[in-house]
Structure formats: C-alpha cells, structure tokens
Amino acid sequence: MQIPAKAEYAIRALLTLAASSTSVSAEHLAAEQGLPAKFLGAILSDLRRGGLVTSQRGPEGGFRLARDAETIMIADILRVVSGPMAGVRGMRPETLNYGGEATHLRDVWVAVRAALREVLEHVTLAQVLRGDLPPAVTRFTSDTDAWITRKL
C-alpha cells in the first residue's frame, strides 16, 4: 500500500496544529513542515470540509483543529483526504466476487483492510505527537522484520 503525499501532508499539518495553542496560517504550516503551499491549501480545504479543521479569516485567523487531538484518529484523516483505506479498483473489498482460482482473493483484501484498521483506527494525533503509540502500533514496530524492505 502506498500512502499518497496528500495523506502524509495532511497528517503532518494536523500534527503541527495539534502542537499549537493558537490558530496557524496555511503559510506557517507549509513552512514549518516544508510542504508546497498551494497543495497544502487544497488539503486544508478538504480537511475543513471533512470536519477536522476550522478556519478563520483576518489578522488573528488561520487554522485550528475542529476536535481535540485525542479524538482524531489517523484513519479519520486518511478517509477525508484519500477515501476508503483499502479499496480495490475503487470498490469495497467485501463487494468483490472472483471466480476460478481467484475465488478466495476477496478474503485477502478484507484481511488487508482489517490490518490497516487495526493500526490506523487506534492511533490519535495526540499519541503521535507525544510518541506514545498504542500496542496496535508497537507490536509491529518492535518486530525487527518490519523495518526491512523486501525486494522482488
């Protein structure tokens, strides 16, 4: 699975907002995280429409989290900016039907979605900010094999 730049940038921007007690301008967010300002502006619009940030115009304006960082899961962010986490050709895995030798492939896709949910639905922005990751994450990161990139 590839995490699109849009999703990574959204999470990084929201972490910066979570660390701030005041409204933060889009320009500051872009500079703070080294993100392309124009692209971040579009991402922030998606996050606002998705109910994860609020915005205010004017000299005291900027962006803030719409909810407490303890309640915003990484999965929430991914769904807002990228849609379903484990779609197959834009379809939900449970709706697929395969024939012949591929009959049980749907089960694999459903399991992939469940594995993603196991991590991403149990990690909040606040936990990432503190570095206090839950067992759903640390059980994977403590496995040395998880840190090895496999090649064909």
Image (tube, grey):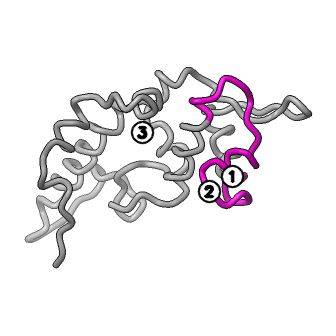
- The 10 Å Cα crowd at callout 2, few under 14, some 14 to 19, many 20 or more, is few
Which mark sits nearer the N-terminus, 3 or 2?
Answer: 2
The percent coordinates of residue 97 (x first, y second) are 23, 59
Q: Which residues are magenta?
A: 17-41
The quadrant in which the N terminus is found is bottom left
Could you say whether the residue bearing mark 2 is in a helix, strand or loop? loop
The disc labelled 2 sits on which kind of residue?
Gly
Q: Viewed as shown, does residue 55 lie left or right of 49? A: right
Q: Residue at x 12, y 46 (%)?
A: 143
The picture quadrant where one finds residue 145 is bottom left
Of all residues, the one furthest to the bottom in this rendering is: 152
Mark 2–mark 1 CB contact (< 8 Å): yes
Query: In the depicted view, which residue is nearer to us: 110 or 128?
Result: 128
Q: What crowding class fits label 3: few (fewer than 14 Cα within 10 Å), some (14-19), or many (20 or more)? A: many
Q: Residue at point 55% right, 49% down?
A: 81
Question: For the residue marked with disc 1, what is the amino acid?
Answer: Ala
Q: Nearer the viewer, residue 102 or 26?
A: 26
Observer-side mark, 3 or 1, equals: 1
The spot of residue 52 in percent (x, y) is: 60, 33
Residue under circle 3? 75
Question: Residue at 68% across / 59% down in the picture?
Answer: 39
Q: Which mark is residue 31?
A: 1
| Principal secondary structure, stretch drawn in magenta | helix
Which residue is the site of mark 2? 34
